Amino acid sequence: MAYLNVNFYSEVLGMNTAMNVLLPQRTRSKIHDDPDGRNHYPVLFLLHGMSDDYTGWMRYTNIERYAEEKDIAVIMPDAGLSWYADMAQGYAYRRFIGEELVALVHRMFPGISQKYEETWITGNSMGGYGALSVGLTYPETFSKIGAIAPGCAPDGFFPGGDLCRVISRSDRFWSDIFGDLSAFKGSKNDLGALAKGIVDAKRPMPEIFQIVGTKDFFYRCNVEFRDTLHELGVNPKFVEVPEAFHAWHYWDEFIQPILNWLTAKEGA
Amino acid sequence: MAQITVNWASNIICRNMNCSVILPERATTAVPTLWLLHGMTDNHTSWMRNTSIERYAAERGIAVVMPDGELSNYADMAHGHRFYSAIAGELFDLMGGFFNLSPRREDNWIAGNSMGGGGALKIGLANPDKFSAIGCLSAGDTVFPFPGTKPGDNLEIDALLYRVYDGREIEGTEEDVLGSAKKILAEDLPAPRIFHAIGKDDFLLESAHRTRDFFTALDGNPFAYTYIEDEGAHNWAYWDKHITDFLDFAMQR
C-alpha cells in the first residue's frame, strides 16, 4: 500500500485543496501480468465529518489496513464544514467531488478502475450525508453508497430543529450552506427528494448501506430516511448497532462491514 | 500542478520510503518526466523547498519525481540499503504504475545536484534504455573521494565512503560510471545526451574536470556532451538557475 498526500488545484473550488490517497502498489512492469487478470483496483471515496478534515480517517481508524486487505484504492478529500453541498454562499463541494474529483482521480491514477460497479462513496456523520447527497446526485457515477452514522436530515440542526442543541450554529451558518432554510424540504439538499428524483426519472439507483448506533443523535433521522426509501420502493441495507453513539471508536468498527459489502462479489 | 508526497513500500529496501511528485493534474495524455535527485544532507523535499521547480515543470507540462536517497550516493551500499536498485529499478516502475507517466525513452530525463548529479550520471548511463538526457549539476562522475582530501581528513566522509563502498567491486558495475559510458559506445546502445554544469567556485570543480576531460576526448561527441563552467558555487541559487537550462537542453528535439 502506498500513502499519498496530494495538494492540487480545483477549478470548481477555485483554490488549492488537499487529499489523502491510499493506493495498492502495482508496478509498471507487472501491471499487465496480474494473476487475477485484474489491471485496475476499485476505488472508495471516503468523506470526513464536521470538525474533521481529509486527515481524519487515517488518524482515527485503521482504514489503510482494511483497504490493503480488500486491495482497493481510497480517496479522502477535504470539504471543510460545507456538508458536501454546492453552497449557497461558498464552495461547490458536491460538484467538486461528484464531477471534478472523480475525473481528476481517473486521470491522475491510471491504475484506478473507471467502472461504475467499482466506484463507491462512503463517509461518517456529515460525510455520511455527503456520501448520500453526492451519490444520489451522481447515481451514474457511484454504484454503492455506504453511510456511517450519517446526518440524513441536517435541517434538524437548524435553529428550532430537534438537534439544534447538539451543534449550535447560527441561521447564517446553515443558510450559507443550504440557502433558504424554509425551503429545505424537497430541495436538492433533501436526501429523500434526491432519491425520489432518481426513481421518478428511472435513473439507476445506487445500492445503499446505512449503519448507525441506537444511542446516536442521528439514529432517528436514519430510521426516517430508511422509511422514506421504503416508500419509494428502495431497500437499503440497514444496520442499527445497540448502544453505539456518535464516535470514531464505532466508525472504525462500522467501516469494516461496509467494506465487506462494497467488495462482495456478485451473488456471493 | 498537483504536489504529492508518496509514502511507498520498497520490496528491495524492505521498508517504507518517501518520494515527492509534481504532476500536471489536468494532462490527459502520458507526461514526460524529470527524475530529480537531491544531494548530501538533503532529502526528497529539498528541490521543492529551495527552488521553483514546480513552476518550471508547470511551464513545460512535465512531471517531476524526487526520491529520497538519504546519504547513499545512490548506490547499492556495502553497509546499508540498496538505493540504486530501489530508485533506478523499483521506483521507476512503480511511479509509472501509479501515475500516467510516459514510458518513452525520449520523455524520461534524470538530473540532480551534487551527490544527485553524480547519481544522475550513474543511473542514466547504466540505464541508457530508460533515459534520453542526463543533467549533472555541481558534481563529477564520482563525488567521492572529495578532491584534496585524504583518509583521516574528514571522519564523517570516511565513514560514509566505508558504508557505501567498503571494498565492493566497482569495475563493470553501475558504480563504474565512465565504464558504463564506454559500454554504451562499445555495444552501440542509445547514448543519453549529457548536460554538465558547475560553478567556478565549486569545491568539486576537480571532479567535474575529470568527467569533462573524458567526454570531450570522445570522437564525434556521441553523448552530445555540453559543459558549462560559469559564475557560481555549490549552492541552491546555482541549481535553481541551471535546472531550467537542463530542461531546455533535455527538451530540444
Image: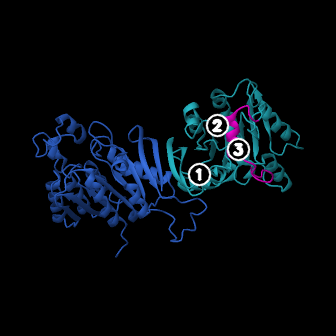
Chain colours: A blue, B cyan
Which residue has dot 3 on it? B162
Gap between marks 2 and 3 measured at Cα:
15 Å
Is the residue at mark 1 from the same chain as the one at mark 3?
Answer: yes
Residue corresponding to mark 1: B101
Q: Chain of mark 2?
A: B
On whether residue A43 falls in the magenta region, the answer is: no
Q: Amino acid at mark 1?
A: Leu
Q: Secondary structure at mark 1?
A: loop
> Toward the viewer: B11 or B95?
B11
Task: State whether residue B80 is above or below residue A264.
Answer: above
Residue B48: quadrant of the picture: top right
Furthest toward the bottom, the residue is: A267
Residue located at (45% from left, 49% from top): A104
- Point out the tag, 1 or 2, that comes first from the N-terminus: 2
Foreground of the two, A88 or A97 = A97
| Residue A206 visible at all | no
> Amino acid type of disc 2?
Met
Towards the viewer: A187 or A176: A176
Mark 1 to mark 2: distance in Å? Answer: 27 Å
Relative to A7, residue B12 above or below? below
> Which residue is at 57% across, 41% downward?
B44
On the image, the x and y values in percent for residue A54 come to 36, 45
Residue annotated with mark 2? B40
Label 1 resides on the chain identified as: B
Residue A106 position in % (x across, y down): 47, 54
Q: Chain of mark 3?
A: B
What kind of element bears circle 3? helix
Mark 1 or 3: the one toward you: 3
- Decide which of tag 1 and tag 3 comes sooner along the chain: 1
Residue B143 occupies quadrant: top right
How far apart are the two marked residues, 1 and 3, measured between alpha carbons? 36 Å
